[in-house]
Amino acid sequence: MQIEPLKSWMPQAGKPFVVAGPCSAESEEQVLQTARALKATGLVHLFRAGVWKPRTRPNSFEGVGELALPWLQTVKKEVGMLTATEVASAKHVELCLKHGVDVLWIGARSTVNPFTVQEIADALSGVDIPVMVKNPINADLQLWIGALERLNQKGIKKLVAIHRGFSVAEKLTFRNSPLWRIPMELKVKYPDLPLICDPSHITGDRELVESVCQKAMDLDMDGLIIETHPHPEKAWSDASQQVTPEKLVQILKALDIKSEFSPNQNFDSHLEEFRRQIDRLDNELLHILSLRSSVVEKIAHTKVENSVTALQRHRFDQLMKERLDAGKELKLDTAYVKEIFDAIHEQSIKEQTDYFNKLKK
């Protein structure tokens, strides 16, 4: 992909690049009140507000629609802030371009559908406008990359990826599981692609937003998109995850922004020693996984002899409970342990079924 650096089209963007504003544009007064408060902070580079709100169920507030676009024009003209909103169709794109919206974003529900993304990409063909793309709802890196590529192929080079977390069946701490390895893999594949974090949608809880902001900075993400409302408790959508402009300032000023490099001359030698330790531990892990695979084959052979299925759900449930309890004793993150053993179990079932199929041939 051909990506233009963030600084080339958003020269005022700092570290972090900050996008903020209400989840939904509710009224002109609310939009302008929020924009003026954010402008006064001197810390926000782009004003966001949802005009069309895709909701899980009908009869929920789905945004005021086209009526809100002139409000964004007023924000740009009277407050002096660049504006952004979500689009989910070619019609949305047409209306936003007509009203001079500066940046568009594609939401998670749209990213998951290649037909929708292609429709938006086609509508933007030949248009020089930045587009931010949220990860799809499901944990599929290729869908995320595919959406970015569809836009890029239509000439959109001012691209930003937004990490907003992934929907999982079992809810733990967060509304949407961060699965940090996925955005990090995207960053490795496309180092020139700006990557920002959406702690509002990851957490679903304003009390957790600050910690996720810091985590994003620790992972060297380029920015944050944070839902901000003058009166969050009265918001018409996602009230629990929005913060006030005052709280936003506290969060941003408290961030510990780290650098990729250190002026400390001993840093490299210390880091290299720790990396050698990690290498040794990783090699031990690989050896253990190899030994485990050998035992799995023996289990498969025993199951074949006794006409038992590869998947034994009660055994897995018991195993997972024991592993999670053991992880807690070792002060390991529960979601991390669960993700690891879900992957290990999935591979175990695959190895057993492959063994079954091999015997049939």
Image (cartoon, rainbow, N blue to C red):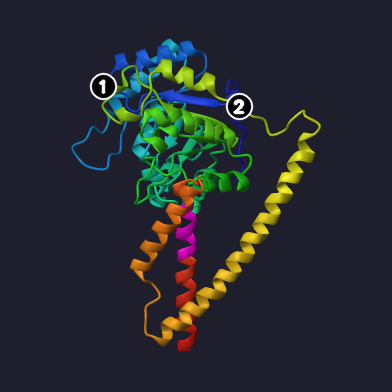
Q: Which of 221/86 is in front? A: 221
Q: Give the mark nearest the N terminus, 2 or 1.
A: 1
Q: Which residue is mark 1?
A: 234
Left or right of 22: which side holds 4? Answer: right
Residue 246 lies in quadrant: top left
Q: Is residue 45 visible?
A: no
| Magenta-colored span | 336-345
Which residue is at 38% across, 15% downward? 74
Above/below status of 349 relative to 68: below
How far across and how far down the image is residue 9, in percent?
A: 58, 27
Q: Which residue is mark 2?
A: 257
> Disc 2 vs disc 1: Cβ atoms closer than 8 Å?
no
> Is 254 within the magenta?
no
> Is 339 within the magenta?
yes
Secondary structure mostly seen in the magenta stretch: helix
- The label on residue 23 is none
Q: Which of 306/105 is in front? A: 306
Which residue is at 53% across, 19% downward? 253
